[in-house]
Image: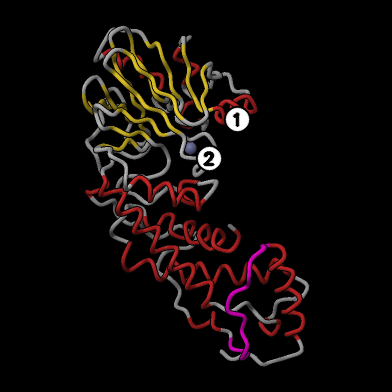
Amino acid sequence: MKSEKTDGSKGVRAVALATAIMTSAPLYAQSTNGEHMGTTIEAPEIAPIGVRPAAFMKVPGSAQGPEIDRKNGYRIERLGSGLYMVTDNAYQSMFMVYDHGVVVVDAPPSYAGKLKEAIGEVTDKPITYLIYSHSHADHIGGAGGLGDIPVVIAHAETKRLLVRDADSQRPLPNVTFNKRYTLKLGSQVLELSYPGNGHEPGNIMIYAPAQKVLMFVDVVFPGWMPFRRFGVAQDIPGYFEQVRELGHHPFEKLVGGHVSRIGTHEDVELQIEFNDDIKAAASAALRGQAFATAATGIEPANSWAFVSDYTARVASQCVATMTPKWKDRLAAFDTFIWDQCYAMEQSIRVD
Ligand SMILES: [Zn+2]
């Protein structure tokens, strides 16, 4: 569709300027010949946000872990000497047995009520340490039900957030650190470190060097698309960097905090490739789609409508670019690809 060059271009420039100021970013692909490029892309086959598809895509076998014990509602997986994952196939936590007790890492409320029973299948030693991966209630909101635990360890930022949240189900840590903290209990070791903001401030890496097991939550979702908006990453460039860094980490097993199986380096490499692809797809869409002109029927004063019209076309092109290669490679691609494309274009424009 061709649109005429009209006096409205003045209004467009004004809006474009206002938007550039608001987003602190250049506007890409200003139409100079009056052509409205956005009308040429095909609608992606994936249902947009808010529209339920006739059927969701099937979960591939590569995204499925072992079944949980239906009676218990959880399963335990041994990760190495004295180290175990507990999962209900939606959330994941760990515990480590040492000479005099048990270290628990995270207590997701979805099965925390069964955590002591799960540990009891392996040892009758008491829980003496609790580590929080980060502050989010869906991962540690069952901690209050575990009773008094002598030592609760978290990043200083996590404590700050928990003080703010004032949630009795997430007791405050009594040991905090900023960069690194090593917990050595006899021959068992956990190395805690903070890679900076990505998912949220205070989200730490928990590494068991003897077992070569890394727990890093809400970053890579083995076999699956990240949860919406890159796992609700608060800092998307930081998140991208952390996924890339994971590629160099010496772990052999990754406990990602979600989904039904542990992760491997293959899962990390797949996520790196996905991230590279979506960044390229969203960048190309930002360049390729023209900002609407006044001739497209938007009131010149309505800056929000111009931005919404533009970003919707950018996201649509991004989804259409990503779909052929990725729809069968990560479970629930269809569920969150629109969210990822919107998050990506936003991040490229303003971060
Ligand atoms: Zn989280």
Q: Nearer the viewer, residue 326 or 111?
A: 326
Residues rendered magenta in the picture: 23-35
Identify the secondary structure beneath mark 1: helix
Q: Quadrant of the N terminus?
A: bottom right
Q: Nearer the viewer, residue 323 or 198?
A: 198
Where residue 57 sits, quadrant-wise, is bottom left
Residue 45 in the image, given as x and y percentages of width and height: 40, 69
Q: Amino acid at mark 1?
A: Leu
Question: Residue visible at 56% across and 68% down?
Answer: 312
* Image position of 165 (left or right of 232): right
Q: Which residue is mark 2?
A: 200
| Magenta stretch, main secondary structure class | loop
Give the number of the disc on residue 246: none
* Magenta residue check for 32: yes
Q: Quadrant of the C terminus?
A: bottom right
Question: Residue visible at 75% across and 76% down?
Answer: 299
Give the number of the disc on residue 161: 1
